[in-house]
Amino acid sequence: MSVLLILASFSLLIAFGYYQRSKRAKNKVISIIADNCVKCQLCVKRCRSKALGVEDSDNGKCIVLKYSEKCTACRDCIAICKFNALELVSRKQTEYQKSL
């Protein structure tokens, strides 16, 4: 009986976590703080959805959010970054900035 209760609880916990992640992915997206970024590319390597990438710019290479629609806001890249160069922002905010 207790094993069944533990399995049911575990299943509910997984389902709730999946629901929260999908809800967050609809509203949030990763943003790069260029002043803090040292271009180590750990976040690019950690990104499971391949939303982050490296682009050449006037100052050399820089980390960018290449595919915002792929970003699931899982926070793996934030967890690996030692320089606080990534943050979660509203998708609406990034869409507004792109339109300017």
Image (tube, helix red, strand yellow):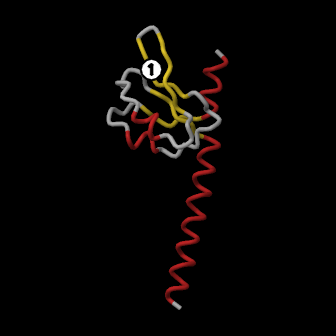
Tell me if mark 1 has few (under 14), some (14-19) or many (20+) residues whose alpha carbon lies within 10 angstroms of its own: some
Toward the right, the furthest residue is 99
Please tell me which residue is depicted at 54% across the width and 67% down the height of the picture.
13
Vertical comparison of 11 with 58: above or below: below
x and y, in percent, of residue 9 in the image: 54, 75
Q: Quadrant of residue 90?
A: top right
Q: Quadrant of residue 41?
A: top left
Toward the top, the furthest residue is 58
Q: Which residue is mark 1?
A: 62
Toward the bottom, the furthest residue is 1
Give the amino acid at mark 1. Cys
SS for dot 1 = strand
Q: Quadrant of residue 51?
A: top right
Say which of 46 and 7 sits in front. 46
Say which of 95 and 6 sits in front. 6
Question: In the rendered view of the protein, which quadrant contains the C terminus?
Answer: top right
Please tell me which residue is depicted at 58% across the width and 70% down the height of the picture.
12
Please tell me which residue is depicted at 61% across the width and 31% down the height of the picture.
67
79 left or right, relative to 100: left
x and y, in percent, of residue 60 in the image: 41, 13
x and y, in percent, of residue 2 in the image: 50, 88
